[in-house]
Image: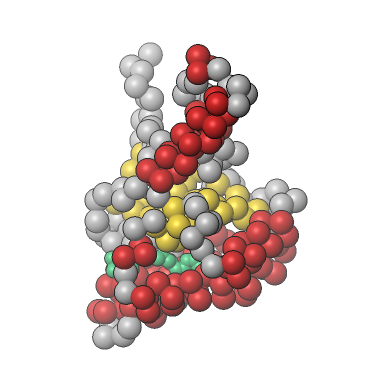
Amino acid sequence: MTPNPRAPHHVAIIMDGNGRWAQLRGRPRLLGHHAGARRVKEIVRACPDLGVKYLTIFAFSTENWKRTQSEVAGLMRLFKRYIRREAHDLKAENVRVRFIGDRVKLEPALVDLMDGLELATAENTGTNLTIALNYGGRDEVTRAARRLAHDVKLGKLDPRQICDETFPRYLDTYVLPDPDLVIRTSGEARISNFLLWQSAYAEYEFIDTLWPDFSAQIFAEVLVRYGLRDRRFGAVKA
Ligand code: FPP
């Protein structure tokens, strides 16, 4: 397939609607998350043909701890299972995996798997998959400010050097380009603390489809619509 020259370089996705998808079928919410994980695989695999080099997905937010203990525990089990099961294919398919978010609150067994997958795929040069796990935009900016203040205190950084080029170096996403397109599934039109700094000039698509129904075909259609948009980054058209 010829890569689409107007494809977004970096797509970020808020994968919403797993719970409703399961409830509509009279099934437990966790079943929706499992179906959602299968879509993750399909969407990651679709990226090279669609010309998407960076894909960032919101798997668990700093606010998701407020869910029932059994749903949180089930999601943590699912993340561990996903990493164990998919590591081989991700590596073989040239996907470079990174995680963003605060790892401190995550159980050590999960953090070990995350570190292992990052290391195992570090040399890959294909799709850059970033999984946001225990991630919140405000939390990320706050942690960045703390690290930056520390560097100022140590004399490593002069406060006069702090600008919109130096600050993002302290964010979890320091190696990633800003997202061009943010997609949220399930019909909700909000950003829920996702990539707050990075999405300043992103385009948004709010899709009614629930995440477990979000196919590679729908993904491709969303990208075609994105290609028709006129991005001006605050400037006027020449
Ligand atoms: C939001 O849907 C979804 C989540 C909080 C979890 C996202 C997780 C996955 C897609 C599972 C797999 C991910 C990886 C990386 C293996 P919701 O439960 O809030 O849906 P609702 O709004 O219908 O309740």
Relative horizontal placement of residue 127, taking residue 217 as reference (left or right): right
Residue 27 vertical position relative to residue 61 in the rendered view, above or below = below
176 or 101: which is nearer to us? 101
Residue at figure coordinates x 46%, y 34% from the top left: 145
Q: Position of residue 208 (x, y in %)?
A: 27, 60
Residue 145 vertical position relative to residue 2 in the rendered view, above or below = above
Q: How is the image coloured?
A: secondary structure
**Within the image, what quadrant is residue 90 found in?**
bottom right
Q: Position of residue 182 (x, y in %)?
A: 39, 46
Residue 145 seen in the current view: yes
In this rendering, the count of numbered labels is 0
Residue at figure coordinates x 64%, y 65% from the top left: 112
Query: Looking at the image, in which quadrant does ligand 1 appear?
Result: bottom left
Quadrant containing the C terminus in the rendered view: top left
Residue 180 seen in the current view: no
Residue at figure coordinates x 37%, y 79% from the top left: 70
**Residue farthest to the right?**
123
Residue at figure coordinates x 44%, y 61% from the top left: 59
Q: Position of residue 189 (x, y in %)?
A: 24, 51
Q: Position of residue 77 (x, y in %)?
A: 50, 76
97 or 104: which is nearer to us? 104
**Residue farthest to the bottom?**
26
